[in-house]
Every structure is written in C-alpha cells, then in structure tokens.
Image (tube, coloured by chain):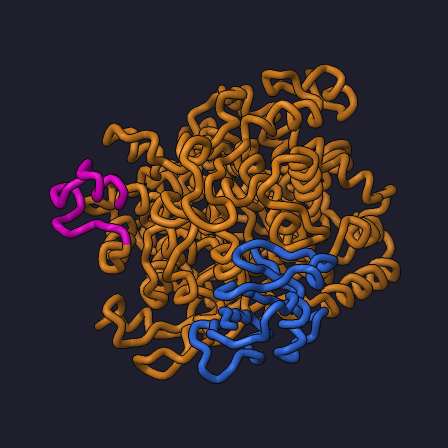
Chain colours: A orange, B blue
Amino acid sequence: MSWAGKLLRVNLTTGEITTEALNEEWKNDYLGSRGLASKYLSEEIDPACDPLSPENKMIMATGPLTGTMAATGGRYVVVTKGPLTNCIACSNSGGFIGAEMKSAGWDMVIFEGKSPTPVYLYIENDHAELMAADDIWGTSVWNTDEWLHNKHQDPLLRIAAVGRPAENGCFYAGIVNDLHRAAGRSGVGTVMASKNLKAVAIRGTLGVGNLADPAGFMKAVNEGKAVLAENPVTGQGLPAYGTQVLMNVINEIGALPTNNMKEVQFDGAHAISGEAMHEPRKSDGRPNLTTNAACFGCTIACGRISTIDQGHFSVENKSKYWGNSGGLEYEAAWALGADNGVDDLDALTYVNFVCNEEGFDPITFGATVAAAMEMYEDGVLTKEQTGGIEFNFGNAVALTKAVEWVASGEGFGQDLALGSKRLCEKYGRPELSMTVKGQEFPAYDPRGIQGIGLNYATSNRGACHVRGYTVASEVLGIPEKTDPLTAEGKPGLVKAFQDATGAVDSAGLCLFTTFAWSLDNIAPQVEAACGGGWTAERLVEVGERIWNLERDFNLKAGITSADDTLPERLRTEAAKTGPAKGIVSKVEEMMPEYYELRGWSSDGVPTDETRKRLGLKD
Amino acid sequence: MNITLKCFAGLARHLPAHAKANAAKVEINEKMSVHQVIDFFKIDREEAYLVILNGVFICPPDRDSTILVENDTLALWPEVAGG
C-alpha cells in the first residue's frame, strides 16, 4: 500500500524496458527510497565494480510517502556506486520530479548498462520510451530542460538532467531536476552521463491513491502539518531565512571552516549570510533574496530564489543570469564563500546559478577551489596552471572563472573537475584535501562540533552532514542541547541521528521535518499510508538495517576502518580562535565506542550477531 | 559598561538604530546577568532561544547567574535551524 508496487527496469545497452513488481519482502525491511534502492543495488552489482563502467547501475527511487499529501512528500533519491568516493552513493533531491514519478505509477527506475548513443528516458504514466538525445548532448541542464519542454509541448513535464561537466567526467557532477533542485553529491550525475543518459522526463497523471487507511492518513498528515506550522523553526525561521540562517550561528561559535579549514571563523560571514540576503544592496537598492520557494507538498518552503545585480562583474553582459533563480543554501554559501575566503554575495550567487545550470555539486566544487587556493598560496600551483590569473583566498574573480572552467571543461577546469582528493594527490599535497572517503566536508568544523566529526568519518557516502545531523543537538538544541566541544556521549548521539535519518529518507520525506517532528510524528503517517505495523521503533530498526547494508557494500568495495577518519589537519592542528581554540577533533577517541554501539568488530565490520539481529546476509 | 549586542533573524528588530551587520555597541549597567540584558532590550526571554556569550552557548538555567563584563559579545537568535 502507498507504494506503487512496481518498478521500471531500463537496459540502456539493449534499449529494452521492462516492468517488475516491487519486492514485497524488501519493502517491508527497507521501506523505500534510500533503503530499498540500496538493497536493490547491493543485490544487483558487484560493489567492487568501476562506478563509471556499464556494470554499475543507477536507481532513481521514491518512498511510500512521495507524491502523497504528507508534508514534504516530494523527495526522491539517486542510488548508485559513486565515482567521487568509490562507495555507495545516495543523493536526495526535492522539487517535483519525485512526486511525478510516483504519480506516473513507479516506485523506482533502475538503469543498467550503457546506451550506444545519447538518449533520454521519456515516461508518461505506463508508457516509457528511450529517445535520441543527440541534439542536447553537450549542452547544459537548463538548455536540456527548455529543449524537452518545447519538444514535448508539455509545460508540466518534470525533468532531471545532467550538464556538460557530467559528460566530461567531472567526478562531482549531479543530476538537476526542476532547474535548481539537485541530487547533487558524490558524482551521481557522472554515473548517469557515463551511461549516455542525458535526462529523464516524466509526466504522471495517475496520482497516489492506494493508501492503506485514507481517513487515518489525512488525520495523521494534518496533525503533522500543524506541528510544522507551530514550530518556530519550520513555521517561521526556515521560510524567512532558509538554511542560510546558520551562517552567523556557526561563525559565532567558532565552527565555520574558513580558507580550506585553516581557520574556524570568517570575518566576512555576515556579508554572505541569510540576514544579508534580505538587505538592500548598495549598488542597486534591491536585496539578493527575491522570495522563498517550496518543493512538492512542502509546508516549510525553505528554498531561496535570488537575483544578482545586473551590474555585478560576474553577470555583466550575461542576461540569462539576470532573472530569478535558485539562490544560496547554507552549505553552498559556505563552500563557495567562507571556505574560499570570498565575501561577495552576488559572486557566490552567480557561481551557484552556474552549478545549477550545468549540474555540479557546489560543496565539492567550492572545497576543491579552496584546496587549489591553498596550493596556490603555498606556491605549489602557479599562474601557469590557473589560467594565468591569481588564485588566492578571497579572490571572487578567481572563483567565478573557476566555475566557468569546470562548466566548460576547459583549462584549469579539468584539474578542478577532479575534486580535491585527486587534485591534491596530483600536485603532491594530499594532506590539503579536506575529505572523508574522497568526499568534501560540509559547513561544520569537527574541532568546534565534535559529534559531526564522528558522523563525517563514519558516513557511508563520505563526508556528509545529512547522514547524521548532530549539529541540531550540539548547536541548535534540537531535540535537546549537548555540548559541541565534548566527545562524551557523542557516539550514541551520532548513531541515533544516523539511524533515524535512514528512516526519514526512506519514507520519502525531507529531513528538515525533523527539526519539529520525531519519528513518533512520522510513524503514524507511514502506518496509515502503508499498513503493516509501522512504529517509531520499527523505523529506527529499518534505519539501522540500512546503515549496515550500506556499510557492507562499502566493505566489499574495499573500504576499511582506516577510512573512518578525518584529515590530519583536523586531528592535529587545533582551532586558532573561538570556543574551540586549542582543541582538535577527538574522532579517534570516539571511534571504538561508536563501533561497539553499532555492533561492529574493532575493525569496523558488523558482527554475526548484528547481522542476525538485522536480518542481513553473512 | 560597553558590550557588543548581536541580534539575528527575527530578533534583529530589537537592535538600536546604529546597528550594522546585526551588531551594535551598546551600554549596559555593571554586573548585569544574561537574562537582565535580554530584559533590558525588551526581548522576550523565550524568544531568545539561542543565547551565545563570546561564542559559548549559555543554558537557560545559567542565564541568571552568568554576569557580563566589559567588551563581552552577546549574540541572540530565536529558535533556528538549517542544514
């Protein structure tokens, strides 16, 4: 119930498209979306395969609440083996395409093999067809979106596409849907392009009506929406300031990574903050922020829609960037701004627009530029490599040039497209890559927020904040305040956040609901939608099962406990300012307790007892 | 005694007119507690959810006993989150 009950399997090598019933046993054990797609991937590919080979598969998946009237029930995920990390990758996106897929009658689409020529998948309810994409290969996401809408003469067509960097092999290309929402991390777009798949265009008119208990569902959904509306974070703070409200908070507590994580506070933080986005610019008297925006079914509406001053150097004579488009979220603003020492809000907005237009992850891109800037300042890189321009921290012009180079695949853009790990290795400075398992950090310094460091180190998709967002507790006091500077109690906190997140993701909901909801608010919605006895406790168990399934995949892919760590800088170079002054990450101190709580051996391998308890294979 | 008062997000309306970048140098009485400063600027104690003094979160039970000194920085937010 609530699941559509069927999936589409697309063999890109042969062009054959088939329909399958959803595996009943697996959906009860893994719920949907992230969990269920990870189960399918684990069963169907060799985790040791080359992520950019035809042997890898890519799954677009929804959850049982996707497309329903549940608040934020518009999420979908892309699950594959990621080229950035060589780990299992699950990248989550909002917008509208997830709900459209579900309304077309599909829980998920599994792509396998590689098309001999560029194609896109067109879905209209039960009809699915691969169509030639030669005319849009080599063009941007935005161009592809416009071309497909024109071709099919359907303004309600929902489109997810990759841009030029994905085609060029950029290791951190994402899949952009609805113009500026993205399954952005870990290089899932690079996998899509490696299969010669340019886009997925969906029109669904069937709706999602097969709820187990329709009346009970509406009651549970309405109760949940009331909680979101009354909560100050989801009812007021996020709509008004978006995630960008965090910029000043995290800087104030001394955990805002700056200049490639050399510092933990940024003098220019306010200039690139959520508050600054509301302030009229000196240049044209208009604010950067135009309005907020919501994804499908969302009653929070945290999205930012921004405009750039038409006289700003980044968009002079570039009219396509003069209109409203997807503005800065906190993680992007940090990676493009503080981590590069750039405090020019419009420059960051322009770079963010290009990341959306061409489909690549602004977190990894920004952090890679930061590593390059540090190497430039150290003399490892010179103007010879950096296109003849200064490439120092604080240089907004260098940042805007860099994004254009990655977009086009030209010059220094080819180096920057490697991501920071490969870039720093290429130039002999691997220690300057601020990554875990090859993926760049988000916007919280593990020296000033200890629990998030443990979460980064153990995240199954490399450094990631949305696998276990302990910042909610350690900084923001949700659900209760813990001391960010202590390691004590953090292994349990990290595990609890990680397991709960797996369940939220797999339901098809947005993680931001959890600033107001606990699993006690979510379980009645899942139960009324799906039936079968879904409780908060069962959801936690599903989350834990997913975590261990992902871990098993990574172990088979070659990851070991040695990869569960942070860069040396964060373990040995203490924070220089703020409350964490003199403190390093205590990740090594926390790891044994974390492994024990997980039911893993001292080598980080799930024990037989843990596997048996969670119903996992030996 | 002078301190720096910072009010962010929905609390910015409590800042004096000379504030810039959500911060203002303000004069308060000697030996005022965190709660007394919040009251002094007519800010609802419950609305000032996130209270950070010189970068350190002050728990609600400590807001009466924590006394400000010259040149302290008190930063206030309503309940906020992101990610």
* Of residues A29 and A573, the one drawn nearer to the viewer in this rendering: A573
For the point 32% across and 32% down, the residue is A422
Q: Is residue A61 left or right of residue A188?
A: right
From the top left corner, tell me how far across and down residue A84 is, in percent.
41, 35
Give how far across and how far down residue B28 sits, in percent: 56, 75
What's the residue at 40%, 38% (across, down)? A434
Secondary structure character of the magenta stretch overall: loop
Q: Residue furthest front?
A: B30
Q: Report the side of A415 relative to A8 (left or right).
A: left
- Where is the C terminus of chain A found, in terms of image quarters? top right
Q: Percent x, y for residue A210?
A: 79, 54
Residue A285 can be seen, yes or no: yes
- The answer, for residue A84, to whether it is visible in the render is no
Q: Where residue A191 sits in the image (x, y, percent)? A: 43, 38
Is A427 situated above or below A140? Answer: above
Callout count: 0
Q: Nearer the viewer, residue A511 or A376?
A: A376
Magenta span includes B66: no
Q: Quadrant of residue A193?
A: top left
Toward which corner of the image does residue A476 lie, by quadrant? Answer: bottom right
Left/right placement of residue B36 relative to residue A458 reads: right
Horizontal side of residue A186 vs B56, given as left or right:
left
At 71% across and 42% down in the image, what residue appears? A500
**What residue is shown at x 36% (from left), y 47% (from top)?**
A365
Quick one: A217 or A560, which is closer to the camera? A560
Residue A378 belongs to magenta span: yes
State which region is magenta. Answer: A373-393
